[in-house]
Image (cartoon, rainbow, N blue to C red):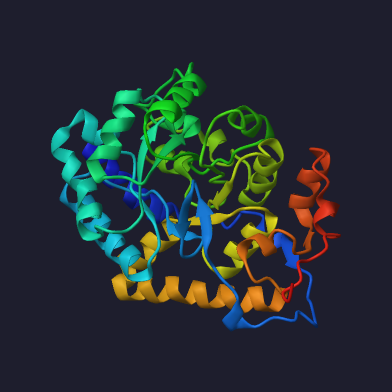
């Protein structure tokens, strides 16, 4: 099977396997404030990642490209939606275009459709510095995402089996690529130990990409004659991964992703410590079933709902959300407790004053 055919397979299987909704975010509860002292008109959704200002913390996270005209059309539509909603967009892994230059058009389509928007290039941790520079140039990228996908590669019949030297390659890319670098997982979450390693690098952010959204082990196992089913439930849930990452990499900005679907998911992720939130598989499903207008409406509704929640919490900014108290229960609490990450500390925070 060619790489482009595999990209199309990924889309079909990602939609058919769905999202498990096992992010852990449903086990979190806000602490209500009856006197928030707030006003919807006086709060801001803006955030800063890698020195660049975003109008809101949400963005279209990496999904596709490299699969011929079908993926070019998806990237065009996603980029047009991102432009309409004034949010950043990441393209899928551009390694396909480096191996097969004719596929570069499937990624360039995103920049063509959104010439002035913030765009994130994407490549794997096996990449060289020159390859990293090439994918950034390909779409005139404002950022580079370097994805970590060990489990997907191991589950993929034709995938990589050697992951040595990745940290050193990432460090070299950070020093030489010329744009802010974000390291992201691909749906299996980043834990404390990995975050601690990444904390030493000059990154713009770490994207947790936790378990609970599109499951690429399940996707690859659908394609395999000998599925590695033990990987289907492998990973760190999104809510847990945000805390593990922010605890292990206290000097880094954290981006949440992995199964996020609505404003409540986003705001809970921000309260846990993230500064931005990427949505992908859920948005793709809306695009392919309801069209661009439905997707624009969904994203704009997320923004509106976020403001309502921030007003209720007395938070005038994304930074204020980092101080909002939160009750963590269920398996998420248990995981954090046995890992020594003190989930009770979120419950006793002193919230920011809206009027200060």
Left or right side of 162 for 42: right
In the picture provided, is 53 more to the left or to the right than 197?
left
How many discs appear? 0
Q: In the picture provided, is 253 more to the left or to the right than 14?
A: right
Q: Quadrant of the N terminus?
A: top left
Position of residue 9 measured from the top left corner of the image (x, y, whole percent): 30, 45
Q: Position of residue 201 (x, y in %)?
A: 55, 29
Is residue 291 in view?
A: no
Q: Residue 181 at what x, y percent from top left?
A: 45, 38
Q: Residue at x 55, y 49 (%)?
A: 255
Residue 263 against residue 173 in the figure, above or below: below
Q: Nearer the viewer, residue 31 or 204?
A: 204
Horizontal and vertical percent for residue 112?
19, 55
Residue 174 sits above or below residue 114 on the image: above
Q: Relative to 31, is 176 on the left or the right? A: left
**Image quarter hosting the C terminus:** bottom right
Q: Nearer the viewer, residue 112 or 38?
A: 38
Residue lying furthest front: 356
Nearer to us in this view, 260 or 59: 59
- Residue at point 64%, 44% (across, down): 241
**Whether residue 135 is visible:** yes
């Amino acid at each position: 099977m060619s790489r482009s055919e595999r990209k199309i397979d990924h889309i079909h299987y990602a939609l058919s396997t769905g999202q498990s909704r096992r992010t852990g975010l449903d086990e979190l509860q806000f602490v209500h404030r009856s006197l928030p002292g707030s006003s919807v008109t006086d709060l801001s959704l803006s955030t800063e990642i890698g020195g660049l200002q975003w109008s809101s913390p949400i963005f279209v996270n990496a999904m596709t490209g490299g699969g011929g005209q079908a993926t070019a059309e998806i990237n065009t539509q996603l980029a047009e939606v991102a432009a309409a909603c004034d949010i950043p967009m990441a393209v899928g892994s551009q390694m396909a275009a480096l191996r097969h230059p004719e596929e570069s058009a499937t990624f360039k389509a995103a920049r063509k459709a959104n010439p002035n928007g913030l765009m994130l290039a994407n490549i794997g941790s096996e990449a060289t510095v020159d390859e990293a520079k090439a994918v950034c140039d390909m779409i005139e990228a404002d950022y580079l995402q370097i994805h970590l996908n060990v489990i997907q590669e191991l589950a993929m019949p034709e995938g990589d089996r050697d992951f040595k030297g990745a940290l050193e390659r990432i460090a070299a890319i950070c020093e030489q690529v010329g744009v802010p670098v974000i390291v992201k997982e691909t749906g299996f979450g980043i834990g404390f130990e990995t975050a601690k390693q990444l904390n030493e690098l000059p990154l713009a952010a770490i994207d947790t990409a936790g378990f609970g959204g599109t499951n690429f082990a399940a996707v690859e196992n659908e394609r395999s004659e000998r599925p590695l089913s033990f990987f289907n439930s492998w990973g760190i849930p999104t809510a847990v991964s945000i805390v593990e990452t922010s605890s292990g990499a206290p000097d880094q900005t954290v981006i949440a992703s992995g199964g996020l679907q609505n404003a409540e998911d986003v705001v809970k992720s921000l309260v846990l410590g993230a500064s931005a939130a990427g949505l992908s598989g859920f948005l793709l499903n809306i695009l392919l079933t309801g069209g661009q207008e439905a997707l624009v409406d969904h994203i704009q509704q997320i923004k509106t709902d976020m403001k309502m929640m921030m007003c209720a919490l007395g938070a005038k900014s994304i930074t204020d959300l980092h101080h909002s108290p939160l009750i963590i229960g269920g398996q998420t609490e248990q995981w954090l407790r046995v890992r020594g990450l003190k989930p009770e500390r979120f419950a006793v925070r002193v919230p920011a004053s809206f009027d200060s």
